[in-house]
């Protein structure tokens, strides 16, 4: 199946427009006239395993799929691949908008060539699947590192006590470092929220779910700019006001989403839970509606006051006034 997103959106410039694309620093290698993103030899779970990183998905070795989550365009399973635990995402056709389904699959691969401790790593991806009833409506399959079933949403709104200052700072720093790495590669996530941040057994946050992401192009000043204004998906409570207005996408859209996420971490409250969706969409743009800052945590300590100030900077209506992902990393280093 041809990609609706140009190959140039998936790989660094130095690997195109050659007829056969060579290996890159990524866990994936794309070859012309091939529907499969191929995987070179690499370290997997701390070991050099050539067969795990085979050039195609060996479907006979992908076993024991157990559902662990689902979303608008597909489902995620826990499975075993050559004996190693992996996460398997199957992107399915959405009958109401098949183009959106295809875009979601290929957008997931914007992060395919990236490896970072705060980003969920892609192991392999293909548009080819074994013939079966379950795969009839499948657009593609993505194999990823298995982080676990816990996300930041579970932790924030779980039964445990408040996270505390140190844990809030650690999680925020992890997310900011992940964003900094993505933004350094001109990738904007566009759906950052607690549910899309997985938390490993070692308590490390990893940004996941790139189905709404975009790879921005560089202008003459080497500043990332959106190749088009199209924006699909995302979560309305975390969507930046400029996206709601249809303005160009920039990296600062993620900073707005980070601000809402940080507010959730600190308050353990749901944003806009007293409003309906449409009034929120209108008021965020027209009246600068934002979640309430009346929670006592923002006022009783110097740290809380600093967090309040940072949250307000992140969700500023003017993208130019928001801090960068690098600014966020520096801020949490000194907190």
Image (cartoon, rainbow, N blue to C red):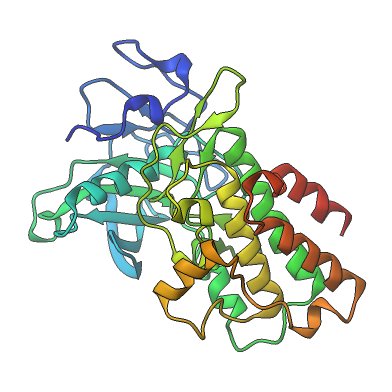
Q: Is residue 163 visible?
A: yes
Residue extending furthest top?
A: 18
Residue at left offset 29%, top offset 44%: 103
- Above or below, 296 relative to 265: below
* Residue 322 in picture, x, y percent from top left: 69, 49
The answer to which of 56 and 96 lies nearer the viewer is 96
Residue at left offset 44%, top offset 54%: 209
- Picture quarter containing residue 164? bottom right
Residue at left offset 72%, top offset 48%: 323
Residue at left offset 49%, top offset 62%: 196
* Residue 130 in picture, x, y percent from top left: 14, 48
- Above or below, 136 relative to 122: below
Report the quarter where the C terminus lies. Answer: bottom right
- Picture quarter containing residue 194? bottom right
Report the quarter where the N terminus lies. Answer: top left
Q: Is residue 235 left or right of residue 159?
A: left
Q: Is residue 225 left or right of residue 94?
A: right
The answer to which of 207 and 34 lies nearer the viewer is 207
- Picture quarter containing residue 123? top left
* Residue 188 in picture, x, y percent from top left: 52, 43
Residue extending furthest right?
A: 302
* Residue 246 in picture, x, y percent from top left: 42, 48
Q: Is residue 260 left or right of residue 10?
A: right
- Above or below, 221 relative to 287: above
Residue extending furthest front?
A: 286
Q: Is residue 58 left or right of residue 197?
A: left
């Amino acid at each position: 199946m041809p990609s609706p997103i140009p190959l140039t959106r998936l790989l660094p410039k130095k690997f195109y427009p050659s007829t056969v694309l060579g290996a890159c620093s990524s866990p994936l290698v794309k070859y012309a006239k091939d529907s499969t993103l191929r995987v070179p030899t690499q370290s997997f779970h701390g070991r050099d395993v050539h067969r795990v990183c085979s050039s195609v998905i060996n479907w006979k070795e992908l076993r024991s799929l157990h559902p662990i989550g689902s979303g608008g365009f597909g489902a995620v399973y826990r499975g075993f691949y050559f004996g190693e635990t992996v996460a398997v995402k199957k992107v399915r056709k959405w009958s109401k908008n098949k183009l959106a389904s295809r875009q979601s699959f290929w957008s997931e691969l914007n992060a395919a060539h990236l490896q970072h401790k705060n980003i969920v790593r892609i192991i392999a991806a293909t548009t080819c699947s074994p013939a079966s009833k379950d795969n009839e409506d499948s657009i593609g399959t993505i194999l990823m590192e298995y982080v676990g079933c816990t996300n930041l949403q579970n932790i924030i709104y779980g039964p445990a006590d408040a996270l505390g200052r140190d844990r809030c700072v650690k999680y925020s720093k992890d997310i900011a470092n992940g964003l900094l790495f993505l933004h350094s590669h001109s990738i904007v996530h566009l759906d950052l929220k607690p549910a899309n941040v997985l938390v490993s057994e070692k308590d490390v946050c990893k940004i996941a779910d790139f189905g709404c992401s975009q790879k921005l192009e560089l202008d003459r000043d080497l500043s990332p700019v959106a190749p088009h204004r199209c924006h699909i998906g995302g979560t309305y409570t975390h969507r930046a006001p400029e996206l709601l207005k249809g303005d160009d996408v920039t990296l600062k859209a993620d900073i707005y989403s980070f601000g809402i996420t940080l507010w959730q971490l600190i308050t353990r409250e749901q944003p806009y839970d007293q409003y309906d969706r449409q009034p929120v969409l209108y008021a965020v743009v027209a009246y600068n509606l934002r979640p309430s800052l009346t929670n006592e945590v923002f006022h009783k300590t110097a740290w809380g006051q600093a967090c309040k100030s940072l949250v307000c900077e992140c969700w500023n209506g003017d993208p130019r006034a928001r801090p960068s992902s690098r600014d966020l990393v520096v801020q949490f280093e000194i907190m």
